[in-house]
Image (cartoon, grey):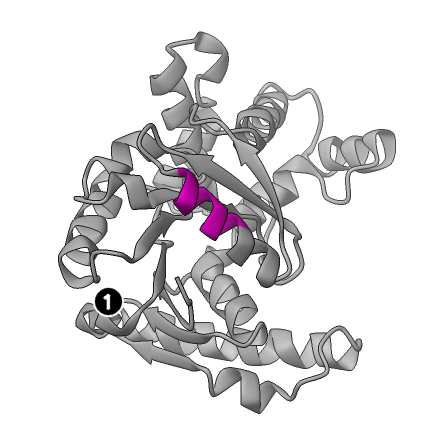
């Protein structure tokens, strides 16, 4: 397929980042969200991010030209013009199923549909559509404009042609694609989230303060960011959702979400996006 227009559903942190990278790579972008406030916030975030990248010499094209290629829309029907689609809505199976079913009826039959899910079964998501052979996982890392990795995950029915097309597109937008098999959490979150969960247990049990735990991991393990600060960046609700997918998928008690993590989410302390998580922002 000759991909010229990429549709992205969900204008949160991930969706906005994917839209920015696609537009900066020369693609026309349709960015959809049911909440127009999210669309406005995404555009402001792109403007700020592009300005920084241009200042550092990472991008040579003007930000106005890049932003002109992004069309925000609350109407999913406009995706009839899309040649390729990335679903990037909240990490919840029911939410994703509703979006995927709606997209499936709108998109042309040959259009490849991908999901940015970080943990949910690609085979299960693909089965919600009439195009499981043209469906796969395309899991970007946060923040998308800065992180090179994208996990590519085949469903049981994903065709070789679909995989080759998605891999080529990932490379064209400057990412390094790595194939992961369709297991809960794939590679990245199967390793990362239990580490974050264990850090929350250490905090709950009084092993150390949040600052001490993060400092040990930064200075002792050479991590660029401590696990609790990283959880705040990702969103504690997202972390909890992924841990629940791992716990339900493997039925192994080692993936049990920490009670403190659940309590923080219940309190609405979700991290940077709410101004309070393990730290105050």
Residue 187: image location, x then y, percent: 56, 29
Looking at the image, which is closer to me, 27 or 203? Answer: 27
The stretch drawn in magenta includes residue 164: yes
Residue 72: image location, x then y, percent: 35, 78
Q: Residue at x 22, y 70 (%)?
A: 80
Q: Quadrant of residue 48?
A: bottom right
Q: Residue furthest top?
A: 252
Image quadrant where one finds the C terminus: bottom right
Q: Name the main secondary structure of what is drawn in magenta.
A: helix
Looking at the image, which is closer to me, 134 or 185? Answer: 134
Taking 215 as reference, is 191 above or below it? above
Image quadrant where one finds the N terminus: bottom left
Asked whether, in this view, residue 90 is left or right of residue 50, the answer is left
Tell me the element at label 1.
loop
Q: Residue at x 57, y 48 (%)?
A: 141
The stretch drawn in magenta includes residue 22: no
Taking 145 as reference, is 98 above or below it? above
Q: Residue at x 37, y 49 (%)?
A: 114
Residue 157: image location, x then y, percent: 31, 32
Taking 140 as reference, is 266 above or below it? above
Taking 206 as reference, is 170 above or below it? below
Query: Is residue 278 in view?
Result: no
Q: Which residue is mark 1?
A: 34
Q: Quadrant of residue 208?
A: top right
Query: Is residue 151 in view?
Result: yes
Residue 185: image location, x then y, percent: 47, 29
Asked whether, in this view, residue 226 is left or right of residue 125, the answer is right
Q: Residues within 10 Å of mark 1 (few under 14, many from 20)?
A: some
Q: Which residues are magenta?
A: 160-167
């Amino acid at each position: 397929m000759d991909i010229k227009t990429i549709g992205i559903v969900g204008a949160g942190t991930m969706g906005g980042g994917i839209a920015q990278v696609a537009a900066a790579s020369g693609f026309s972008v349709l960015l959809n969200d049911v909440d127009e406030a999210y669309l406005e916030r995404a555009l402001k975030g792109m403007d700020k991010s592009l300005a920084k990248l241009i200042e550092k010499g990472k991008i040579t094209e003007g930000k106005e030209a890049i932003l002109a290629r992004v069309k925000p829309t609350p109407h999913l029907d406009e995706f009839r013009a899309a040649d390729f689609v990335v679903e990037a809505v909240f990490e919840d199976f029911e939410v994703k199923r509703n979006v995927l079913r709606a997209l499936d009826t709108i998109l042309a039959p040959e259009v490849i549909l991908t999901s940015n899910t970080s943990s949910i079964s690609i085979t299960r998501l693909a089965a919600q559509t009439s195009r499981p052979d043209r469906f796969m996982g395309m899991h970007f890392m946060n923040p998308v404009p800065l992180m090179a990795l994208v996990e590519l995950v085949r469903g049981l029915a994903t065709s070789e042609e679909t995989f080759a097309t998605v891999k080529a597109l990932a490379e064209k937008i400057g990412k390094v694609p790595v194939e992961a098999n369709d297991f809960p959490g794939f590679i990245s979150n199967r390793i990362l989230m239990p580490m974050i969960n264990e850090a929350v247990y250490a905090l709950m049990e009084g092993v150390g303060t949040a600052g001490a735990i993060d400092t040990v991991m930064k200075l002792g393990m050479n991590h660029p960011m401590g696990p609790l600060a990283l959880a705040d960046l990702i969103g504690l609700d997202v972390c909890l959702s992924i841990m629940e997918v791992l716990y339900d998928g493997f039925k192994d008690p080692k993936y049990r979400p920490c009670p403190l993590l659940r309590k923080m989410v219940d309190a609405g302390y979700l991290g940077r996006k709410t101004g309070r998580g393990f730290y105050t922002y």
